Image: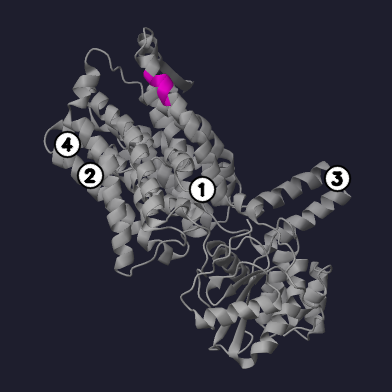
Amino acid sequence: MTDSTTTSTTQGPPRRDLADLLSSSPVMRFMRTESGSAGLLVAATLIALIWANSPWSGIYHDLLETPVSLLAGDIGVSMSLHHWINDGLMVVFFFVIGMEVRHEFSVGELTERRQIVVPLIAGVGGMIVPAAIYLALNHTGEAAHGWGAVIGTDTAFLLGVLALVGPTVSTQLRVFLLTLTVIDDIVAVSVIGIAYTDHLNLAPLIVAAVALAGLVVLDRLDVWRASPYLALVALAWLSTLDSGVHASIAGMLAGLLIPASEPSRARVEAAATGFRAFRQSPLPSVQRATRDLLNRTISVNERLQEALHGCTSYVVVPVFALANAGVDLRGGVLGEALGSPVTWGVAGGLVLGKLIGIGTGALSAVRLGLGKLPQGVGSGHVLAGGALSGIGFTVALLIIELAFDDPALRDQATVGVLLSVVLATGLGWALFAIAARFFGQRDAERPRFLSEPVDPGRDHIYGHSSAEFTLVEYLDFECPFCAQTTGVTRDVCDHFGDRIRYVPRHFPLTDIHPHADLAAIAAEAAAKQGTYWEMHNLLFAHQDELELEDLVGYAGQLGLDTERFLRDLQDDRVARRVRRDVASGIASGVRSTPTFFIGNQRHVGPYDAQSLIAALEYNASHPDAVNTYEDED
């Protein structure tokens, strides 16, 4: 397996933590931004309420009704400031949501369709039950039109409150809840476009449809500049303003059509070559060419998200709250609202409906064997997260504005939304506390088990595929600690002989080891020619020589077809093989390298040969035992 002569020590060397790498992932950046904007959202809501109930409330309402025009000659758009916010700024918000959904389905958390089943069923339950509760209290008249206000969840508020009242370590829970909100967002915008459209103007709709079709054409033509996409999005938005369909649906549909893809190896290498050329000749023309190469490496979807996400989180949503949460509660309005079935239909639908719908849906799906909860997420966490999903705020306020013509009903529904924020937060906190005290679910713990079992058809296995003992290692070819453990794994395999199978998986720490990702891809490219283990050994033997030309040299040394090897280095399918290992490692609680799994359970503690042998033997005699070591981190 290995020619390394490195001897094992009595205890493995200290490992490098991956917290920084994980915190820089797209999902973690998203959650951090949304959580941070929650504070602004609360502040904007309080300012709106105080202002609307102050002696200066007239200024508040007059400001929102101020006409604002954008004209070019006789052509242009003229709306009140309130409508510019709801029909203009919020389109940017839904455009970003649409791009996030497209990204998650194309290259993100939702590429593994089996991971969607439980959140999908929970999300559907979290919309049907709230709507049913609302309609049970408001089944006739104009009040019945407000059922759509209870189906959505405000992601910013949800994540912000979760950070305050949820488990200390809750990444897996947050990702689970984010998947729910993806489903909510799609359905909520569809409801806006279908249920709250009174009339349709065909000509503007055709123009909008042509503009959206143009986005598909740009994708097919592999257009990488953002400006053509933005021009068509603007045309789709302007067209929907006169179509009778709320402009938010144009934003969501346009976002869904912005292409998202992983950076291809060929484009990354081209950008690296361009950068080296600029370093040698820092001329304006070379700078422009290098910038274009860098932009082409990252998809239009991710570049636009990067540019717009901060704006939507820190400007658009707080401004929307400021414009829509200002309910004048004087003159008996509050008392009227507290006695109104509309208020309690909204509050009950959001708070109780989300809890019952999401909780029942998720736990029933698990019980029926349709899927499983993420590692470290318990039933108590799901129920508490379902309660927090009752914070509907942004989408709820927008739908209330569309659903009711009667200002009194609109105010009552808005009070219900504001009540739901308080009640859902309190209920979520209480359920987290109950889960911790009575069910031992104190934190959404760092996962301890392999998210993907060993697969002889996919994994590289040293030993017999059905051996009694299994040792899985997540490794990094540039990590010096991983190189030291090659002797450890050799000793362990020698001890057990044909009773053990050793399974290496990739986990390149690219922020620490810049050559590790390419080295992992090189190992997989060699595997396509039947020489994985030989390349595995060479890479560890030459950790300080992992440039592209070095890897090609090793391929030649092994007698490989170097032209095929180079093609495989640029093959996205080979790169996806490495990324799948990384994704399974993150889902299994891997944060550093080397990380070992004894059977399907993450090993915590020393990883010298004797410790691993003892852990393997203990696991074989106690298969249901859980590792009781405490994590170092």
The residue that appears at 57% across and 50% down in the rendered structure is: 26
Q: Check disc 4 and give the amino acid type.
A: Ala
The residue that appears at 54% across and 83% down in the rendered structure is: 456
Q: For residue 441, which quarter of the picture?
A: bottom left
The residue identified by callout 3 is 282
Magenta stretch: residue 432 in it? no
In this view, the residue farthest toward the right is: 280
Query: Considering only order in the chain, which callout, 4 or 2, is on the residue closer to the N terminus?
Result: 2
Q: Secondary structure at mark 4?
A: helix
Is there a contact, CB below 8 Å, between mark 2 and mark 4?
A: no
Q: For residue 597, which quarter of the picture?
A: bottom right
The residue identified by callout 4 is 144
In-front residue for pair 99/603: 603
Query: Considering only order in the chain, which callout, 2 or 1, is on the residue closer to the N terminus?
Result: 2
Query: Considering only order in the chain, which callout, 3 or 2, is on the residue closer to the N terminus?
Result: 2
Circle 1 or circle 3, nearest the eye: 1
Question: Can you say which quadrant of the picture contains the C terminus?
Answer: bottom right
Q: Secondary structure at mark 2?
A: helix
Query: What's the mark number on residue 131?
Result: 2
Query: Considering only order in the chain, which callout, 4 or 1, is on the residue closer to the N terminus?
Result: 4
